[in-house]
């Protein structure tokens, strides 16, 4: 009970800090890092739904990231549709693709599943590079419009500056966190966690584990597609080089670094691993070495992730 009371002021303080953050870091450079951290937070959260809740590893999620980005960008550039429409269509398309792929590959497990999803991700990248009439190949898509002004509660809201993108991204992250929190506390959430803990046991008592895994894979793909759509209308340019297997690995590292099976862990991992490389730029050519050593250190000494380790020690102190 005491922890619940402490959580309320902590959440209020965190919300206040996030709200005033652009007032202290108003340079476009800092705001860009903040917005990219928000995008990666959604990507890490979406993958965490699959990895942390059901224990299924995917190395092909960058494909859904790219699908959401390309669908949203193409609908905006070629058909003139508003971001507020293409955003949801991009996520829906990625979710449907994830559903179809999930039905095919989720009978596999472990490293075989990881390799198969990685192959799928590479295949999608090849299509993006070579389907030139649609994707414009390696040259990518330019001229992607910003989100159009929207009337909300009697006010005309326009997304024009990086500060506007920051607050829109913040709402996006909070919305995804709330959505996953509701899933975690639902019956489907319990079923997914049961699959992670002992899939064979769950099967033996007659529960269809495939439904839980496909649901997690589909929702994860849809959220990843939404992040892709947001990315496209923030950067205003996309190309296949952004959606390679290295991006899938980057998402997975963020989840592991922050802490799997937690809601805030992937967010923390995304923030740390987006901000840290920027601070290491001053190290010049040694920055990648320092970055790699830091990752290895945290993974060895904090196997539960940063957030998971903090929760463990706080719980131990309360006892």
Image (cartoon, helix red, strand yellow):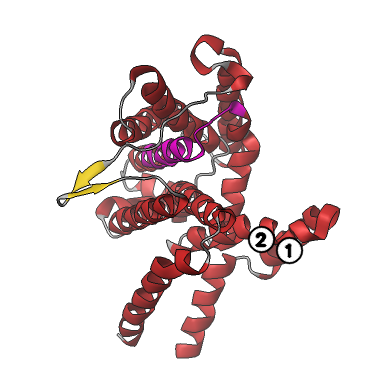
Q: Nearer the viewer, residue 160 or 263?
A: 160
Q: Which residue is mark 2?
A: 276
| Disc 2, SS | helix
Residue for point 67% across, 62% down: 299
Residue for point 51% across, 9% down: 133
Is 236 placed left or right of 305 in the picture?
left
Q: Which residues are magenta?
A: 218-240
Percent of width and height locating residue 66? 50, 31
Percent of width and height locating residue 169? 40, 51
| Disc 1, SS | helix
Image vertical order of residue 90 relative to residue 151, above or below: above
Residue for point 55% across, 53% down: 28
State whether residue 83 appears in this view. Answer: yes
Image vertical order of residue 262 relative to residue 60, above or below: below
Mark 2–mark 1 Cα distance, whole angstroms, equals 10 Å
Q: Main secondary structure of the magenta part?
A: helix
Q: Residue furthest right?
A: 285
Q: Nearer the viewer, residue 248 or 312?
A: 248
Percent of width and height locating residue 108? 52, 34
Residue for point 44% across, 42% down: 227
Image quadrant containing the N terminus: bottom left
Q: Residue furthest top?
A: 133
Is 92 placed left or right of 297 in the picture?
left
Q: Nearer the viewer, mark 2 or mark 1?
A: 2
Percent of width and height locating residue 318? 45, 89
Q: Which mark is residue 308?
A: none
Image vertical order of residue 23 relative to residue 215, above or below: below
Image quadrant containing the C terminus: bottom left
CB contact under 8 Å: marks 2 and 1: yes
Q: In the rendered structure, does residue 3 fall within the stretch colored magenta? A: no
Q: Which mark is residue 294?
A: 1
Q: Nearer the viewer, residue 236 or 280?
A: 236
């Amino acid at each position: 009970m005491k922890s619940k009371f402490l959580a309320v002021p902590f959440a209020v303080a965190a919300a206040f800090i996030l709200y005033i953050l652009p007032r202290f870091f108003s340079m476009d450079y800092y705001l860009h890092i903040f917005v990219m951290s928000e995008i990666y937070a959604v990507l890490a959260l979406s993958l965490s739904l699959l990895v942390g809740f059901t224990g299924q590893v995917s190395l092909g999620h960058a494909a859904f990231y790219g699908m959401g980005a390309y669908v949203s960008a193409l609908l905006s550039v070629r058909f003139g549709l508003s971001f507020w429409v293409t955003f949801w269509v991009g996520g829906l398309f990625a979710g449907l693709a994830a559903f179809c792929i999930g039905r095919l590959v989720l009978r596999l497990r472990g490293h075989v599943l990881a390799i198969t999803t990685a192959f799928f991700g590479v295949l999608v990248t090849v299509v993006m590079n070579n389907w030139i009439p649609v994707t414009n190949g390696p040259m990518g898509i330019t001229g992607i419009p910003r989100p159009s002004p929207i009337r909300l509660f009697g006010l005309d809201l326009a997304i024009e500056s990086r500060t506007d993108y920051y607050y829109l991204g913040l709402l996006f992250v909070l919305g995804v966190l709330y959505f996953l929190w509701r899933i975690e506390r639902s019956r489907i959430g319990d079923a997914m966690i049961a699959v992670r803990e002992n899939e064979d046991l769950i099967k033996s008592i007659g529960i269809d584990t495939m439904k839980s895994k496909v649901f997690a894979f589909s929702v994860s793909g849809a959220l990843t597609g939404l992040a892709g759509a947001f990315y496209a209308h923030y950067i205003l340019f996309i190309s296949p080089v952004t959606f390679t297997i290295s991006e899938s690995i980057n998402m997975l590292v963020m989840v592991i670094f922050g802490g799997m099976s937690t809601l805030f862990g992937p967010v923390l991992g995304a923030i740390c691993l987006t901000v840290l490389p920027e601070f290491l730029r001053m190290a010049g050519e040694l920055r990648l070495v320092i970055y790699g050593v830091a990752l290895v250190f945290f993974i060895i000494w904090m196997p539960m992730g940063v957030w998971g380790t903090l929760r463990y020690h706080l719980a131990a102190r309360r006892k």
